[in-house]
Each structure stands twice: as structure tokens, then as C-alpha cells.
Amino acid sequence: MRIAIAYPTTIQLIEKMASLYDDISVIVLDGYSTLEGVQWAVPRRLRPLGLESHVEILSEHDERAREYDVLLDSLETRHYLPRWWEDCEAWHGPRIVKILWKRPYKPELTPARMEVLKRSVLSTENDSNRKMWEEATGLDVYEARYYPGDWWFDTEWVGDREELVFVLTHAKSREKNDANSKDGLHDFWEVRRLCPGYHWDGDAEGHPSSNNMATQLARFRCYTNLDRPVSSRPLCLVFTEMLALGMPTIVRNYPKHDYVHYIDGNGFVCESNQEVADAASRLIADRGLAEACSVRSKEIARRHFSREVILGQWDVLLEKAIQCQG
């Protein structure tokens, strides 16, 4: 089955789909990026992972751009390139619309746009987001997560750096956010005053490939995600990747927080930043405890995010998309 992905979208969507399927078209739409730019950036991201041959990059004007079985695009595509709403009439055939991070905003859901969504299969990352979109649209919305990638599962946790790691890229643009912002940066600054901690920022680290990122992060003793939830907050990619890596994991216990459901013998759920620091200090001091948590994180990741599990979710979506056109 040939899957086409509309660009602009997130590079992670392309990477994760290429890790599941080996025949992907990336269709570059006019008005956001040049074809040459995408032909340079996407292979650069995929080459170190051995996925470059899985993806063909085409202009929307290329006749081959219409040779797909299912078109995958995201609401974020429409955020980056608003004209895509109006262009959808020109793109026939089965379609999956992936909701990555946008929440429903009813004034945007005009009758014409609702017709586009009705002809599509809608998919999101988590149950709370699914319910929000179902209530806003009256349509069925299906869950299908990302596969972290073989390289995250194949990399072994080392834990020789006796520090708690917090992962957030583009931190410079977030430093002015107030202490209640959802990205957790200010919380981590507080935690870092209480225990050894390191902020891993892709910008500062030179944007390594995903497999090199796994190797670098595997050295830290433990990991924390300090996202403050919003009603539609999905599991972030790095959280599932860190579980696949076998990282001992610490999260805050916020209401409606998805992450707490994946802590079961592999780390700690904490009520405050002080508790996060105390948990990290325990893992740093007790290598045996950290090793046991690491084993358990891998087990949880394999149960929920293995290739077989995620491929099964996407196969269901693809079948539903084809049935919608039947």
C-alpha cells in the first residue's frame, strides 16, 4: 500500500511513518517550502536511520503525486498552509486526517471544512483529544499512536551519567514563558536546584539524528517529563521514545495527565517538584533500583508501542479510510 503525506507537516510524522511503511510519498504543496528544500531536509533526517529509500519526495504538480492508496495529512498542515482546506476538493481518494496537537476551535469548523472532515478518517493520539474532537464534530475519531522506531528499542540504557535529564528543544524561545506554561521548563529549573539535572535541548546539541539522540540520552540515569497538561495533551514523542530506550522515568501527577498511566514499576509519579527531585536522587544513589526501572520501562514500551501494536492501529485506519470511499 502506498501512503502519501501532505507537506508541510511535522518531520516527526514523516520519520515515524517511514519507520512503519517502506513506500511513502511526501507531496510538497506550494506556498510553504521549496521542493528543493524538502528534498534536502527530509533525506538528511532519514538517512542515518536507514529510512531514506522508504520515501519519495514529489511536487504537488507531479503526476506521480496522485498515485497513492491513502493520503495522510494533518490539521497542522492546514495550520501551516491555510489554503489546503480549500484545495482538498482536488485531492480524491481515501484520506486520513491526523490531529497532532491542535484542539477543536468551533469557529474554524465551517460547513465547507466539516464536509472535508466527513470524507476523511480522523485520528489522534489519545483518548481525551479523541473525545474533544468527537464532541466538536459529531464524527468518529480513532486513536493511532506513533511507533518510536527500531533504534530506540535496540539502544540499551547505560545510565552512567548520574543526572536527571529533561528534554525540550527550542528552549530559548520558551524562556520568557511564565511559570505556569505547559512545557515544564520553569519546573525543571526548580528541580535542578534540588538534584543533579541536565536540560537536553536539540538546538544546543546540534540536532543529532534520532539514533544518535538515543545513544546520547541512554547515558543519563533517569528522565522526567514535566509537561503541564491541557485538556487535549497527547503523549509526547520523547516520552514514548524514552520508555522504549528503557529509561527510568519520573512524571508529575496532574489531572487528566496521560503519562501517569505508563508508570508502573518503571519510575515514580510525583505530586510536587520536590518529590521529583527526591525520586531522581533515589535513582541516582541506587543503581540497582534504576536498573529494575529500566527493564520495566522496556516492557511497558513493548506492550503499548511496539511495531506490531502500532502497525495494527494504522492498518485499521488505512482500511477504514478505503472503506469510506467504497
Image: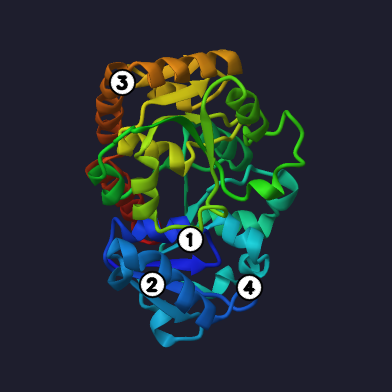
Say whether disc 2 or disc 1 marks the residue closer to the N-terminus: 1
For the residue marked with disc 3, what is the amino acid? Arg
For the residue marked with disc 1, what is the amino acid? Ile
- Give the SS element for disc 1: helix
Q: Is label 3 or label 4 in front? A: 3
- Give the SS element for disc 3: helix
CA gap, disc 3 and disc 1: 36 Å
Q: Which residue is mark 4?
A: 32
For the residue marked with disc 2, what is the amino acid? Ser
Are the residues tagged 3 and 4 within 8 Å (C-beta)?
Answer: no
Q: Residues within 10 Å of mark 2 (few under 14, many from 20)?
A: many
The front one of 163 and 217 is 163
Say whether disc 2 or disc 4 marks the residue closer to the N-terminus: 2
Q: Position of residue 35 (x, y in %)?
A: 52, 81
Q: Position of residue 5 (x, y in %)?
A: 44, 66
Q: Which residue is mark 3?
A: 287
Q: Is residue 125 left or right of residue 323?
A: right
Q: Which residue is mark 1?
A: 11
Q: Measured along the vertical axis of the image, is residue 88 above or below residue 59?
A: above
Tell me which residue sits at (50%, 14%) in the image.
278
Q: Is label 2 or label 4 in front? A: 4
Are the residues tagged 2 and 1 within 8 Å (C-beta)?
Answer: no
Q: Is label 3 or label 1 in front? A: 3
Q: Residues within 10 Å of mark 4 (few under 14, many from 20)?
A: few
Say whether disc 3 or disc 4 marks the residue closer to the N-terminus: 4
Say whether disc 2 or disc 3 marks the residue closer to the N-terminus: 2
